[in-house]
Amino acid sequence: MTVHSSLPLSTLAKATALLSLPALGAFLVLIVRGEMSVAGVLQGYLMCLAGVALILYPLLSNLHTLTRYVKDLAQDKKVAAPVLSSLNAIADLSEALNNLQISWETRQNLMENEKNEREILVDSLPDVLIMTNEKMEILRTNRAARDIFGQNLHGQKLEAIVPNDKLLNGAAAVMDDLKGRMLEFQMIEPEPKDFRALIERFPVASTGGIALVITLNDVTELKRVEKMRADFVANASHEIRTPLASISGFIETLQGPAKDDEKAREQFLSVMSEQSKRLTALVTDLLSLSKIEMNSQSIPTGRVDILRMVKNEKESFAWMAGQKRMEMVIDQPETLPEVRADENELRQVIHNLIGNALKYGHDGTNIIISVRITSSLPNDPNFIKLQRAVIVSVRDHGDGIAREHLPRLTERFYRVDSARTRKIGGTGLGLAIVKHILNRHRGALTIDSIVGEGSTFSVYLPIFEDVADYTMA
């Protein structure tokens, strides 16, 4: 497509007059010599002007169009290259400029793509990224930062977003001595979080004014796990040390002052037997928990008749229920589909829940064991793609559990009433084992309790056919 812009007549007139000056001088010489009349010279000069104008017009028009095209390119306008045919040299120049525009646009597109890729990469980083200028004003952030500290961060002061003296002092020190620093700090608002911060001076001069790059790694979960491990070691040591100290003390007594005391020996041996049973149960639970954790990524693939298992476990507790004058009632449909599970591990779950209900329920009350299919699934990632599950609920009529204790019941060695738990023989690991078994089975546990009325522990398990259909899909 030919692109032309109209050539101003004044430009054509000036150029024509300028180029016709030599001809005008020649005509004047002829008049002076008397070789031509004034009328002849005028006629000849006009013809000369017309000829020069005819020659100049296409050239000047092409040059004018080319000038406009270059100006448009300089302003990043998307314009088509003009087709210039008056002179080969100008046409070649037009083609060269057109190629330059194509190359320019290609590079510009590449730069835009690279910029977008960098933006996406920065936004997808899991760590918080904050960039500030020398005045500690925020210039750039990523999505992780905006999710924690809010969306409108640009231009705000760092101290207004992260009001922590340790971080702010570290940032000021990096600005002064240009040496990067790593530090840890804790924030209380908007929610308690622990961060590990890396503060670096921006390595090159930035046209955008970026002076500091602050990377925040959320180590809240890591700190929590470290604390849980430390608490676990301390609690396990304490739980094991207590019966060992008791047994050791009684042995020393029997070897010394009570060596010949028949009555004391019988009494001490009875207590030592109880303590050894407690220690055995504790070690057994610890080994069981360790084994379950080792297999946590291996999802069970077996088929289990959950109704038959519940009935068997009920029978195994018949004697204990009789001792407390308690009745166990199973509320069930006629048939139930099989669940996907490891039979031995699932038996531990049912055994633990029924055992706890009998231990903590009041004498003479009922234990209600409900087994059914439900479509009211818990808010758990394991059930996002499932429409139904088998639920086993065990309800006791005991003292109940205060609401503040419910979230921590599945922690290792956590006890609402430590003295009572030890008195009835609990290790403090039962519900932790239940939780880890269900995690491996991709199931869920919910706990409802009312103080003074009792508690209901509910286990949700995937149905074998549903999981098989989902896997095949």
Image (cartoon, rainbow, N blue to C red):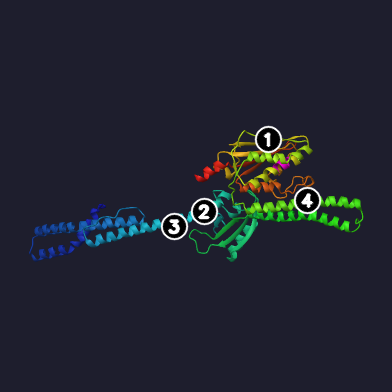
Residue 7 magenta-highlighted? no
Residue range of the region highlighted in magenta in the rendering: 352-357
Query: Secondary structure beneath disc 3?
Result: helix
Query: Which dot, 1 or 3, sits closer to the camera?
Result: 1
Q: Position of residue 69 (x, y in %)?
A: 30, 56
Q: Secondary structure at mark 1?
A: strand
- Measure the C-alpha gap from mark 4 to mark 1: 31 Å
Q: Nearer the viewer, residue 289 or 86?
A: 289
Who comes first in sequence, dot 4 or dot 2? 2
Query: Does residue 288 appear left or right of residue 33 in this picture?
Result: right
Give the label on residue 330, or none: 1
Q: Which class describes the residues within 10 Å of circle 3: few (<14), some (14-19), or many (20+)?
A: few
**Circle number at residue 277:** 4
* CA–CA distance in space, label 1 to label 2: 51 Å
Q: Nearer the viewer, residue 302 or 417?
A: 302
Give me the C-alpha separation between circle 1 and circle 3.
65 Å
In terms of sequence position, does the residue under pointer 2 or pointer 3 come before the other? Answer: 3
Per the picture, the main secondary structure of the magenta-coloured stretch is: helix
Q: Is residue 353 magenta?
A: yes
Q: Mark 2 or 3, which is nearer the eye? A: 2
**Is tag 4's residue or tag 3's residue first in the polypeptide sequence?**
3
The nearer-to-camera label among 1 and 2 is 1
Residue 234's x, y, as percent?
74, 55
Image marks 4 and 2: residues in contact by CB distance under 8 Å: no
Q: Residues within 10 Å of mark 4 (few under 14, many from 20)?
A: some
Q: CA distance from mark 4 to mark 2?
A: 54 Å
Q: Which residue is identified by label 3?
A: 114
Q: Are marks 1 and 3 in contact (CB under 8 Å)?
A: no
In the picture, the disc for residue 124 is 2
Residue drawn at x 65%, y 45% as measured from the top left = 346
Residue type highlighted by circle 1: Ile
